[in-house]
């Protein structure tokens, strides 16, 4: 590539921060996620180190107490699930490319979209503040089951820390709902001329489904968090049964006794769709990138759209598999087992399609493609234990063991972040006009892949041995998992390597912004509209027209057939790059 | 598969068998899928030529690449579900046996208490305002109820081998996870609710009891012991506890 290097349009910092331009907001969301992922990763390393060297003092800190360990686990989960695995695929990426991919010059509600970020930012601040209040952050895990999360006397961190956690969750729900409403209306109402539903890239289909899921699921969490706050401060007793004695102290009975089971149902009615909210955009991106880097269309486009929609729809009906052993009716367990198995079918269909796609054409092994392959690898590795855990009889042994930790870290966390990396390597030229370094990208990929498997695969064995989650120490008064120490140490070393490999990525991100090779206008020779040179295209073809002979001179036909220029209107982004 | 702790329960053999079968099949599916990913990479290095003519997906190709494996995998999932449902139904949907040993398990930060109904075979009433662990009444047994007088409260769970056990599960503060990995057993104790579990311990020995639902700073040390003994030894243990209780009441 010898294209001229475009330069970033210089704008005052304030205009890039206090903005309703979706592309600027994408950067703000990415920076927020970066802060969260750094903190979340450091917490996970502290967790890993404490598990295998329980007596080792941390510098400037000392030996963590059990409650500090649990606070670390709780905050690690909350940061990663909400502020990384939701924020990047469901806020940063759609802000970056969704309007462009449907040929819209701006979001439907730019100010609401901007408000979503600032509410999300406030939510992050509230969460971090929980570290600094007396007794510190909450210790009940990211699922915050009452009555433990309801009664401040039940443990350290369950007072002010828990309140801040709930406020943070409430704000995050508001931010997610605002963002998702905006994406839904944008997709439905602001598509350019010719951008029919059947011509939308699969990423946009994913955002359509995941935004609908967000509206439904986060509403349930919003209600649940509000009810828990009301229970804590107004004595409403939604989740509090009669006859509670905590720490030897008789609690006041609510006027009408409630049940913790109500929280479990509400929380998981949110919690399971949340998995799909964070992974569906990655699935759409995988389809797009495989099409691009094999130079072949997505086979069965409608089949993939159907599978995506089915996953979203079925995803709303599987929450019960998180509470098979929590006092739910055993017949309901069977029913939720069946719906869970049912959702494995469209998921398997997408995997089979990706695998089939890899055997047509020649794969161009760019860094985004490598990370897409990694995404598929982890999606399979974590996905295949799903049908095991879907069986109530087997879940009754594996529930809340490290087997489950292995399952969701592979299928949600690793598959999730690998698709985030694929997206960042792929869309980086949109923001900088340059490509990220491929050698560093390859290095980052291979070390991360091996270290991620080294970290999460052995957790299956710890889980089979019966080791529960949330244990600050491997050995208790009766049961000792000391024989797992070698495995646990291996996991910790792998986790350290995995975290270290991310320094390569950070270095690459910052270095390539100045020294990366010029990307040119459409560096991946892609068909989708985010690479269109103009913001007002007219669309005459589908999203994945690839292959020799599809265009007169090239092996792809972009979706933009014709582009005319028009002056910008409020809420539109000014072009980030200009050619010199 | 030797990772699993030794199984001591009657239903555990079938669970272990099913789990082993599941993991074996899924492990080879995992290997096959990852091999396909590697094959796609290798193929790229081997064939340097540009792609062939455009391949529009024909109906037959779609059938063989997608629908046929999908149908096979779906059949596998359904088979798994049926195989495991039999075990789930046997353990959770059955009616309790009249010969079952009755025992009540109560979780409390960070202890498990085990209560036997005593000679009258009836659990006495408990009251939340009487709960006072330091004064020896961790469950709040009501002295006004005659059934409560002979209730045995123990910190260790002793059960006879070969007899079905009916566990009543309670918690007085927060949600605890009652788990005996060696008995392939797990059920949450939910405050305000009474849970039930049935199983038959088969192999005498000691088995750790864990808490598997995070319940506070002492979660990791909320552990107790299940001792499965021969029926005669169980009766002797129970009699000893009963006479100790009477001696204490007489004092």
Image (cartoon, rainbow, N blue to C red):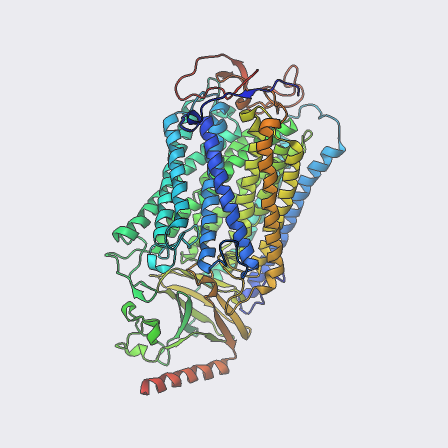
User: Which residue sits at x=40%, y=71%?
Assistant: B113
Q: Is residue A270 left or right of residue A435?
A: left
Where residue A193 appears, as percent x and y from the top left, is 46, 17
Where residue A120 appears, as percent x and y from the top left, is 40, 37
Where residue B84 appears, as percent x and y from the top left, is 53, 56
Q: Is residue A475 left or right of residue B194?
A: right
Establish if A278 lies above or below A234: above
Q: Quadrant of residue A522?
A: top right
Q: Is residue A226 left or right of residue B232?
A: left
Where residue A376 appears, as percent x and y from the top left, is 60, 40
Q: Quadrant of residue A528?
A: top right
Q: Residue furthest left?
A: A255
Q: Is residue B52 left or right of residue A143?
A: right
Q: Quadrant of the N terminus of chain A?
A: top right
Number of marks present in the image shown: 0
> In terms of depth relative to the viewer, which is nearer, A195 or A128?
A128
Q: Residue furthest front?
A: A60
User: Which residue sits at x=50%, y=25%?
Assistant: A200
User: Is any atom of residue A335 visible in this view?
Assistant: no
Q: Quadrant of the C terminus of chain A?
A: top right
User: Which residue sits at x=63%, y=39%?
Assistant: A444
User: Is any atom of residue B114 visible in this view?
Assistant: yes
């Amino acid at each position: 590539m010898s294209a001229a290097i475009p330069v970033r349009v210089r704008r005052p910092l304030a205009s890039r921060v206090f903005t309703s331009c979706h592309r600027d907001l994408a950067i703000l969301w990415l920076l927020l996620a970066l802060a969260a992922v750094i903190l979340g990763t450091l917490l996970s390393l502290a967790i890993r180190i404490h598990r295998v060297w329980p007596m080792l003092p941390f510098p400037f800190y000392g030996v963590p107490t059990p409650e500090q360990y649990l606070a670390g686990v709780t905050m690690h989960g909350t940061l990663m699930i909400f502020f990384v695995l939701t924020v990047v695929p469901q806020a940063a990426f759609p802000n970056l490319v969704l309007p462009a991919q449907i040929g819209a010059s701006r979001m439907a509600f730019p100010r609401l979209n901007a408000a979503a970020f600032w509410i999300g930012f406030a939510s992050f601040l509230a969460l971090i503040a929980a570290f600094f209040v007396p007794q510190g952050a909450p210790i009940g895990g990211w699922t915050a089951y009452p009555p433990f999360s309801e009664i401040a006397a039940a443990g350290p961190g369950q007072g002010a820390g828990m309140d801040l956690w709930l406020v943070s969750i409430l704000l995050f729900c508001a931010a997610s709902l605002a963002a998702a409403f905006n994406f839904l209306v944008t997709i439905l109402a602001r598509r350019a001329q010719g951008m029919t539903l059947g011509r939308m890239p699969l990423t946009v289909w994913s955002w359509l489904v995941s935004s609908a899921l967000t509206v439904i699921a986060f509403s349930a969490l919003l209600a649940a968090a509000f009810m828990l706050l009301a229970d804590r401060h107004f004595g409403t007793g939604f989740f509090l049964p009669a006859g509670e004695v905590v720490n030897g102290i008789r609690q006041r009975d609510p006027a009408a006794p409630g049940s913790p089971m109500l929280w479990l149902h509400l929380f998981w009615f949110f919690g399971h769709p949340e998995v799909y909210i964070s992974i569906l955009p990655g699935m759409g991106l995988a389809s797009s990138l495989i099409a691009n880097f094999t130079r072949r269309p997505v086979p069965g486009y409608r089949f993939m759209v159907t599978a995506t929609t089915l996953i979203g729809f079925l995803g709303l009906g599987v929450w019960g598999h998180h509470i098979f052993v929590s006092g739910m009716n055993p017949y309901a367990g069977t029913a939720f087992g069946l719906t869970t198995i049912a959702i494995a079918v469209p998921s398997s269909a997408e995997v089979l399609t990706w695998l089939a796609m890899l055997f047509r054409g020649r794969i161009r092994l760019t860094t985004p493609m490598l990370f897409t392959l990694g995404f598929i690898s982890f999606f399979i590795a974590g996905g295949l234990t799903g049908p095991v855990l879907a069986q109530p009889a087997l879940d009754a042994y594996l529930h809340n063991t490290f087997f489950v930790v292995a399952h969701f870290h592979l299928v949600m966390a690793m598959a999730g972040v690998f698709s985030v990396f694929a997206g960042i390597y792929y869309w980086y030229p949109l923001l900088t006009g340059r490509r990220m370094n491929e050698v560093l990208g390859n290095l980052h990929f291979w070390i991360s892949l091996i270290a991620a498997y080294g970290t999460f695969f052995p957790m299956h064995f710890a889980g089979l041995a019966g080791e529960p989650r949330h244990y600050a120490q491997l050995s208790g008064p009766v049961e000792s998992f000391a024989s797992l120490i070698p495995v646990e140490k291996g996991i910790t070393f792998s986790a350290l390597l995995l975290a270290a490999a991310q320094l390569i990525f950070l270095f690459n991100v910052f270095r390539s912004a100045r020294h990366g090779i010029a990307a040119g206008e459409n560096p991946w020779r892609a068909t989708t509209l985010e690479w269109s040179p103009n913001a007002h295209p007219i669309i005459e073809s589908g999203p994945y027209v690839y292959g020799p002979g599809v265009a007169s001179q090239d092996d792809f036909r972009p979706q933009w057939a014709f582009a005319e220029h028009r002056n910008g209107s409020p809420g539109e982004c000014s072009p980030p790059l200009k050619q010199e | 598969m030797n990772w699993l702790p030794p199984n001591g329960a009657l239903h555990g053999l079938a669970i272990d068998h099913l789990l082993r079968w599941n993991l074996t099949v899924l492990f080879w599916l995992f290997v096959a899928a990852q091999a396909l990913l590697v094959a796609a990479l290798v193929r790229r290095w081997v064939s340097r030529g540009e792609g062939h003519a455009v391949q529009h997906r024909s109906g037959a190709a779609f059938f063989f690449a997608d629908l046929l494996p999908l149908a096979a995998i779906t059949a596998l999932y359904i088979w798994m579900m049926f195989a495991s449902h039999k075990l789930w139904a046997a353990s959770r949907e059955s009616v309790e046996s009249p010969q079952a040993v009755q025992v009540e398990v109560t979780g409390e930060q960070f202890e498990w208490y085990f209560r036997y109904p005593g000679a009258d075979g009836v659990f006495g009433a408990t009251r939340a305002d009487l709960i006072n662990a330091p004064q020896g009444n961790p469950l709040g047994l009501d002295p006004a109820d005659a059934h409560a007088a002979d209730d045995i409260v123990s910190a260790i769970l002793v059960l006879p081998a070969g007899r079905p056990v009916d566990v009543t599960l309670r918690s007085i503060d927060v949600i605890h996870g009652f788990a005996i990995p060696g008995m392939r057993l797990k059920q949450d104790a939910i405050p305000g609710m009474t849970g039930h579990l049935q199983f038959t311990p088969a192999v005498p020995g000691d088995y750790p009891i864990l808490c598997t639902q995070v319940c506070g700073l002492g979660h990791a040390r909320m552990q107790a012991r299940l001792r499965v003994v021969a029926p005669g030894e169980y009766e002797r243990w129970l009699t000893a506890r009963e006479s100790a209780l009477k001696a204490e009441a007489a004092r």
